[in-house]
Image (tube, rainbow, N blue to C red):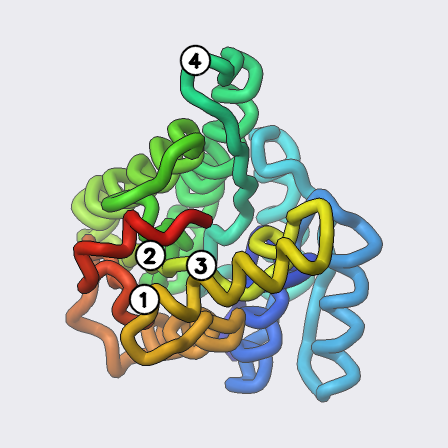
Amino acid sequence: MKVAVITGAARGIGRAIALRLAKDGISVAVSDILTEQVKETAEIVRKNGGKALPLAIDVRDEEQIKSMFERVVDEFGGVDILVNNAGIVHRSHIVDTTSDDFDFVIGVNLKGAFLCIKHAAPIMRRRGGGVIVNISSLHAFATLPNLAVYASSKAGLVGLTKAAALDLGDWNIRVVAICPAAVDTPMLRDKPTEEENIAAANRWKKASPIGLLLQPEDVANLVAWLVSDEARGLTGVAVVLDAGVSADLQVRKIPV
């Protein structure tokens, strides 16, 4: 049985990925700094007949990362799949963004992925190879005002994906990034009022030529395909999943 480690799995995209991979018979180690919610993710997986291990992890801390993978090896015997999904957003004008803001966002979104890759890859090598999926963002390529640090971290993930694919190819490890547009998660619906949340969701629907606001399951289904042998030719690339948003040059006129 294959084993997947999924960071940021307490809710939203990470939880959907855990449920989708478990549905395919993959044992999932789900980690997050949100301890109680990641336990809920594991419990849902188990109720659906899957195998899950919840882990409370701050991905900025290398010692915690090392301990996480040691625990996964002890519990499941190895690691075949890594999904670097842990991420946070920070909204502020670039001149109002502090050094601490920058370090925190980069620490979670980029450094955390780097540390997980660093410690997962040797374990995958012992299993004969594996697949790493980094959840980046459309903001890696085209962004909006007040998202300088977030966009930088997600662009960095694309660069990390390409470099890791080159370094790890000899170990039969594929590395791919997914770059979604807005996804209907708590991170999107973080406005002060429900009315503002609904308006934000509707703006993204309007930005899509097919009128679609992506759901967590849309990302999870793509992950499931990318980690399968059907996607064996994909490595070192960023797959854009945006419901057509980036095809429209006028999308900048739609504030979010």
Using the numbered discs, state the Cα–Cα distance from disc 1 to disc 3 in whole angstroms: 10 Å
Amino acid found under the numbered disc labelled 1? Leu
Q: Is residue 212 above or below residue 186?
A: below
Using the numbered discs, state the Cα–Cα distance from disc 4 to disc 3 in whole angstroms: 25 Å
Badge 1 or badge 3: first in the primary sequence = 3
> Which disc, if any, is residue 182?
3
Residue in the picture at 69% in, 58% down? 10
Q: Nearer the viewer, mark 2 or mark 3?
A: 3
Query: Can residue 126 be seen from the camera position used here?
Result: no
Badge 4 or badge 2: first in the primary sequence = 4
Residue in the picture at 45% in, 52% down? 123
Using the numbered discs, state the Cα–Cα distance from disc 4 to disc 2 in whole angstroms: 26 Å
Q: Nearer the viewer, residue 30 or 13?
A: 13
Where disc 3 sits, the SS reads loop
Badge 1 or badge 4: first in the primary sequence = 4
Mark 4 in CB contact with mark 2 (< 8 angstroms): no
